[in-house]
Image (spheres, rainbow, N blue to C red):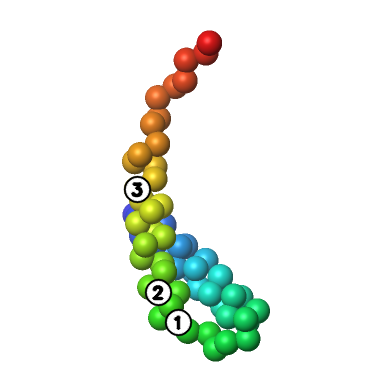
Amino acid sequence: MKYFWTLFWTFILIQMVVYVGSSMMGVEFDFNTGLIITLPVALLLYIIPAIIPNDPVEKH
C-alpha cells in the first residue's frame, strides 16, 4: 500500500510542478510530460531508502 501512495503523491506533485512551470514559461500544459517524469522520480523514491543505511551511528 505504501508503494501505491508514494506513486499517487508523486504523480500529483509532479503534475503540479509541470503545470506551474509551463505557466511560468508561457507554454501549454502537457499532461503526458508529467506522467513521463513521474515514473523515474517514483523509482528514485523507492530506491533511495533501500540504499541509505538504517544502522545507528557510533558516537566518537
Instruction: Check disc 1 and report the residue beneath it.
Output: 31
Q: Which amino acid does label 3 sit on?
A: Ile
Q: Quadrant of the N terminus?
A: bottom left
Instruction: Check disc 2 and report the residue beneath it.
Output: 35
Residue 5, can we see it?
Answer: no
49 vs 14, left or right, is left
On screen, residue 16 above or below 45: below
Q: Residue 49 location in percent, x, y? A: 39, 42
Most foreground residue, 24 or 16: 24
Residues packed near mark 3 inside 10 Å, few (<14), some (14 to 19) or many (20 plus): few
41 vs 23, left or right, is left
Residue farthest bottom in this picture: 28
Residue at coordinates 40% horizontally, 36% vertically from top-left? 52
Q: Residue 48 location in percent, x, y? A: 39, 45
Labels 2 and 1 touching (C-beta < 8 A): yes
SS type, badge 3 = helix
SS type, badge 1 = helix
Most foreground residue, 3 or 14: 14
Residue 7, can we see it?
Answer: yes
Q: Which amino acid does label 1 sit on?
A: Phe
On screen, residue 26 above or below 41: below
Q: What residue type is labelled 2?
A: Leu
Residue farthest top in this picture: 60
Instruction: Check disc 3 and report the residue beneath it.
Output: 47
- For residue 35, which quarter of the picture? bottom left
